[in-house]
Amino acid sequence: MKSKQFIISMALLGVILIASAGGLLFKPSQYEGLMVVVEYDGKNVLEIPLNGEPATFTVKGENMEQLDENGEPILNEDGSTKTSNVATLVRDENGVKFVDSKCPDHLCEQYGYINKVGESAICMPALLSATVVEE
């Protein structure tokens, strides 16, 4: 009788261990159902799901003037000061962040990752905002 109870107890323990391991292995992403909406000059230009693979995203604008940290124009090889690339954002396991912006102060890059509903990173000179929302 005791060996039958022991076998049943061990079988139950095995089922519990397997179920627990399955829950750890197949855990949904912490960012499931969240995305970052990127707006340029008040228009939605990009939606980045937070639960995707690491990736880089470039936001293009309309002939934004490039300025250095002193507010002086940066000249391109052709002598112009305009660029169509406004900013670059990256997504990885920590969330989304600005990594390059064509603005003079780069405050948006210093903000770091956004990954919770309602969090935003804003680049005023580039007219860009990135906000975490529910899908």
Image (cartoon, helix red, strand yellow):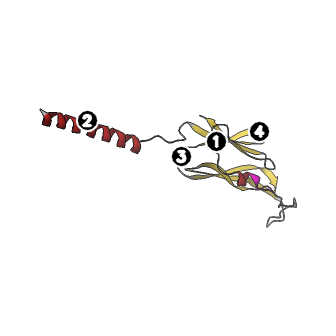
Comparing labels 4 and 3, the label whose residue is closer to the camera? 3
Dot 3 crowding, Cα within 10 Å, few <14, some 14–19, many 20+: some
When asked about the image quadrant of residue 33, the answer is top right
Give percent across and percent down for residue 31. 55, 41
Name the image quarter holding residue 68. Answer: bottom right
Q: Residue at x 79, y 67 (%)?
A: 77
| Pointers 2 and 1 in contact (C-beta within 8 Å) | no
Label 4 sits on a secondary structure element that is loop
Residue located beneath label 4 in the image: 42
Q: Which residue is mark 3?
A: 52
Q: Which corner quadrant of the image does residue 20 belong to?
A: top left
What element does badge 1 sit on?
Answer: strand
- Point out the tag, 2 or 4, that comes first from the N-terminus: 2
The reply to whether dot 2 and dot 3 touch (C-beta < 8 Å) is no
Q: Earlier in the sequence, mark 4 or mark 3?
A: 4
Residue stretch rendered in magenta on the structure: 102-107
Query: Mark 1 highlights which residue?
Result: 36
Is 106 inside the magenta-drawn segment?
yes
Contact, mark 2 vs mark 4 (Cβ under 8 Å)? no
- Rendered image: mark on residue 12: 2
* Mark 2 to mark 1 CA distance (whole Å): 44 Å
Q: CA distance from mark 4 to mark 3?
A: 25 Å
Q: Is 1 a magenta residue?
A: no
